[in-house]
Amino acid sequence: MLTKKETKEVIDRLLRQYPDAKAGLNFSTPFELLIATILSAQCTDAQVNKTTAVLFKEYKTPEDFLKLSEEELGEMIKSCGFYKNKSKNILATCRLLVEKFNGQVPNTLEELMTLPGVGRKTANVVISNAFNIPAIAVDTHVFRVSNRIGIANSNNVFDTEKDLMENIDREMWSKAHHLLIFHGRKICKARNPLCHECPVADLCEYYKEKIGGRKEG
């Protein structure tokens, strides 16, 4: 695994590569981000944004959503996939927000994770982007890129998050999350990473092994 100094260099270079890295989901309130993040499971941000652009015009609060049946909401979010399960979870979450949190989205990881359909990744996205609390949400891009480069060394999401929190300065956690996502989408792709275009190739453990293996062969 890379040292903290090497990790800082990786983050600094990615920051120069992607100065505009930020959340891909459109939202204007913590509640909207919560709903958008639930919808984003196994769906692209672009598709979620198309859906919420229509949805949030009329339904802006938990109380608004609770006027809908599961079937009605399901029809509205069908294009995001897994719409039956998402509809059920969203309405159950809205009910709990009204009953337990006075209609407001809580700003702690523990409370957010009590909401139906909200796991650790979703909770971290919300506290980071809606409340500006430092957090690292580990999605598929963050997991793949961080372990490939060597700023994490784990085969599961939770331990990857712990590695990143230890190796990256706290004030950079949220930004690092976006940088790693951008890098995963644009260069460090799942099947064919564009190592020849990568600004951190000389620090990357995956690249060193790949090149080393070729030389040995």
Image: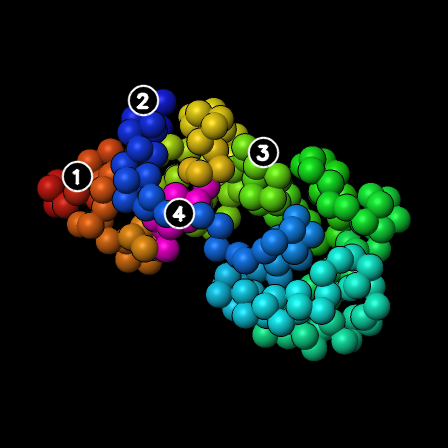
Question: Which residue in the protein does label 3 denote?
Answer: 133
Q: Residues within 10 Å of mark 3 (few under 14, many from 20)?
A: some
**Residue 108 seen from this side:** yes
Question: Which residue in the protein does label 1 denote?
Answer: 212
Q: Earlier in the sequence, mark 2 or mark 3?
A: 2
Above or below residue 73? Residue 118 is above
Nearer to us of marks 3 and 1 is: 3
Are the residues flagged by discs 2 and 4 in contact, CB closer than 8 Å?
no
For residue 100, the mark is none
Residue pictured at 49% horizontal, 50% vertical:
23
Which secondary structure class fits the magenta region best?
A: helix
Q: Earlier in the sequence, mark 2 or mark 1?
A: 2
Quarter of the figure with residue 51: bottom right
Q: Secondary structure at mark 3?
A: loop
Q: Residues within 10 Å of mark 2 (few under 14, many from 20)?
A: few
Q: Secondary structure at mark 4?
A: loop
Above or below residue 185? Residue 76 is below
Q: Secondary structure at mark 1?
A: helix
* Cα gap from disc 3 to disc 4, whole angstroms: 17 Å
On whether residue 111 falls in the magenta region, the answer is no
Question: Which residue in the protein does label 4 denote?
Answer: 21
Q: Position of residue 25 (x, y in %)?
A: 53, 56
Quarter of the figure with residue 145: top left
Q: Secondary structure at mark 2?
A: helix
Q: Earlier in the sequence, mark 2 or mark 4?
A: 2
* Cα gap from disc 2 to disc 1, whole angstroms: 23 Å
Q: Which residues are magenta?
A: 177-185
At label 1, which amino acid type do we have? Gly
At label 3, which amino acid type do we have? Ile
* Cα gap from disc 2 to disc 4, whole angstroms: 22 Å
